[in-house]
Amino acid sequence: MSNLLMIFGLMCAAAYLPLTSASVSWSRSIIKTVPVLAFSFAAYAGGVGPFLVAALFLSALGDFGLSRDGDGPFLYGLSAFALAHLVYILHFMSVSNAPLWDAFSSAPVAAIILVALMVSTELWLATHTGHLQWPVRIYVVIIGAMGLAALTLPFGWMVIGAALFIVSDVILAINLFRMSDTHHHRMKAGYAVWTLYVAGQVLILWGGMLG
């Protein structure tokens, strides 16, 4: 059952890809929400533990929020993803049985690069987010902590998935706050964000199912 739900989620994700730059509609929002929701059900069916199920479910809520217009839905989506990352931190640390700071001994180069990326957002992102500056700053810290938690694991699918998730969010941040609506790379960025995000979620789920 879990494999069928994963396949269904991937099919829905593929169906949404052409809609990444489409105008906001309820049908578009539903199609965007279904893939990771299906992954959440797959995690439940696969018995991979409550943290992974909850993180995927919260991510689906985040997908719905970010599919709508306005600051209210954006903050709702951002909050849902922030909670998802907090639960991912719990999941990764429960698997590795190691504290967050172990990332600097188990994968020091990657951990330093990740922290440098987090700090750099003050230069290229925070000053461009207007009144959303502090919510975005808090989110950056949380997703960075999620990445560090992933680095406490042995290198594998979950680590790769977490990395793809972070790269997806970096491109999304550039797309939302640094690109104009008419930028010639905006559509390509939308495709990249969705592809990397779905791949990241699938690999985290797959890694959890493999144990």
Image (tube, rainbow, N blue to C red):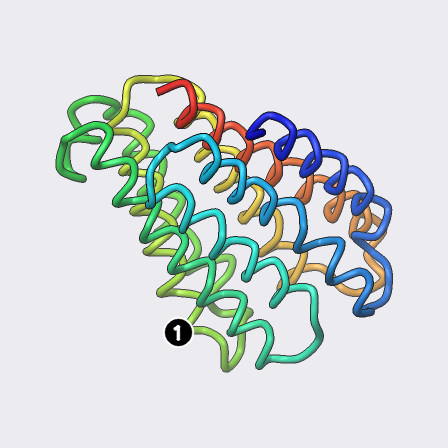
Q: Which residue is drawn at 42% across and 49% down?
A: 55
Q: Mark 1 points at which residue?
A: 134
Q: Residue at x 73, y 46 (%)?
A: 189
The percent coordinates of residue 110 (x first, y second) are 33, 28
Name the image quarter holding residue 84. bottom left
Looking at the picture, tell me which residue is in the foreground, 4 or 79.
4
User: Which amino acid is tagged 1?
Assistant: Trp
In what element is the residue under mark 1?
Answer: helix
Looking at the picture, tell me which residue is in the foreground, 182 or 164.
164
**Relative horizontal placement of residue 191, taking residue 145 as reference (left or right):** right
Q: Residue at x 21, y 27 (%)?
A: 96
* Figure check: 84 above or below 181: above
The percent coordinates of residue 152 (x first, y second) are 23, 29
Sort mark 1 into few (<14), some (14-19) or many (20+) by Cα contacts within 10 Å: few
The percent coordinates of residue 90 (x first, y second) are 25, 45
The percent coordinates of residue 7 (x first, y second) are 68, 29
Q: Quadrant of the N terminus?
A: top right
Q: How many tags in the picture?
A: 1
**Relative horizontal placement of residue 26, taking residue 51 as reference (left or right):** right
Q: Residue at x 82, y 42 (%)?
A: 15
